[in-house]
Image (cartoon, coloured by chain):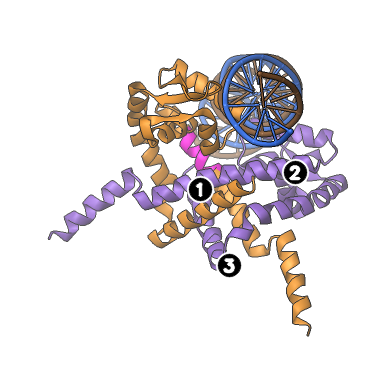
Chain colours: A purple, B orange, C brown, D blue
DNA sequence: ACTGTATAGTTCCGCTTGCAACTACCTCGA
DNA sequence: TCGAGGTAGTTGCAAGCGGAACTATACAGT
């Protein structure tokens, strides 16, 4: 058997069409995401705390030095179109959960900066959000699986950002 | 040490807050999804084929007996609000990719039925879609990991549908 | 058979989204 | 130093979304 040829043939098909196993993984990925997120979103709305997107924006600021991030960096981290981020930040600013600050080093740009009220809003949301994450997601995976998932997702994120 | 107490305490915390490992998995899940889907969506738009949501609806019909599904079943499978499905089906019907048929056994209800043109639209989209799935997702996971993911996602989906 | 309750699907409404176009500013090379 | 090309952020626009309210039909208990 011509191993080299076989390898190339397999290699090619493999890059054009997902094999059934990985396709099943992909389809589960899409559906599981929808189930998890709609449930979490409903839980948050029912408890009258901030929605997932807001929390996501705020926590990135929280984790950044000076609790601030340039708009374009923030957009990249939360994976939003820049226009969408502009408007989301508008809403967050109107709610007092962050403020915009001009960047003295680049007059085109602005920072989004977490406020004390923003931090407080995160604290309020977390009990609900955390519990909802557990019930819809964390409860159903073992420790080993969690490690695998975290690992795989990191790789996928990195790969898609490189060739983006 | 009172093991019973300790156990209950741990057990409780566990159900209220995700542990760091599973939280990391969750956060990767959210971000990876956004990266993967925005990339696939862009690829499909660039190639001028049907979007992911349309493909998703059509393939569920394709896989169902008689290539048809009641509206509410379809909404459940693709994880959409019923109102959203109504309008998505409107668009698909207008494009000729499916048709509505009244259910003779239940005069409230209607079937969505895949048409030949719908099948053709799937065939056109698949080369682009498949390749995009490979590049943004499948390429980055091993066979073992794919098995784990498929398995985990199935469990998550099932659990969220039970208590939904 | 009748009435109350549940389900199927659609419509209405307000909100969010992404793309494309635009302005303002930066950067690099001649 | 000036002009070309790139980047940051905002805005206009058309389209998509989910929840609530509505109509029509089914079903269960009496």
Q: Secondary structure at mark 2?
A: helix
Q: Position of residue A50 (x, y in %)?
A: 78, 42
Residue B21 at x, y = what percent? Answer: 63, 64
Q: Are marks 3 and 2 on the same chain?
A: yes
Q: Of helix, strand and loop, which one carries label 1?
A: helix
Residue farthest to the bottom? B1
Instruction: Return the x and y of residue B60 as percentages of the image width and height.
Output: 43, 35
Residue under the point 13% across and 59% down: A2
Q: Is residue A16 magenta?
A: no
Which mark is drawn over residue A125?
none
Disc on the earlier residue, 1 or 2: 1
In the displayed structure, would residue B130 be above or below residue A123? Answer: above
Residue A44 appears in the picture as rendered: yes
What residue is disc 1 on? A29
- Mark 3 packing: few (<14 Cα in 10 Å), some, or many (20+)? few
Q: Residues within 10 Å of mark 1 (few under 14, many from 20)?
A: many
From this view, report whether residue A58 is shown above or below residue C3: below
The chain letter under disc 3 is A
From the image, tell me which residue sits under label 2: A44
Q: Are marks 1 and 2 in contact (CB under 8 Å)?
A: no
Total labels: the figure holds 3
- Give the mark nearer the N terminus: 1 vs 3: 1
- Which residues are the magenta region? B34-41
């Amino acid at each position: 058997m011509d191993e080299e040829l076989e390898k190339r043939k397999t290699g090619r098909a493999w890059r054009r069409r997902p094999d059934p196993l990985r396709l099943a993984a992909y389809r589960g990925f899409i559906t599981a995401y929808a189930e998890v997120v709609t449930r979490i979103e409903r839980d948050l709305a029912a408890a009258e705390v901030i929605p997932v997107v807001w929390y996501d924006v705020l926590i990135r600021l929280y984790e950044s030095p000076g609790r601030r991030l340039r708009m374009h960096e923030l957009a990249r981290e939360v994976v939003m179109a820049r226009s969408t981020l502009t408007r989301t930040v508008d809403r967050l600013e109107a709610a007092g959960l962050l403020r915009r600050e001009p960047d003295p080093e680049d007059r085109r740009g602005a920072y989004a900066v977490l406020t004390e009220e923003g931090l407080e809003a995160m604290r309020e949301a977390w009990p609900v959000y955390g519990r909802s994450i557990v019930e819809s997601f964390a409860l159903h995976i073992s420790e080993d699986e969690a490690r695998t998932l975290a690992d795989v997702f990191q790789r996928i994120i990195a790969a898609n950002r490189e060739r983006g």
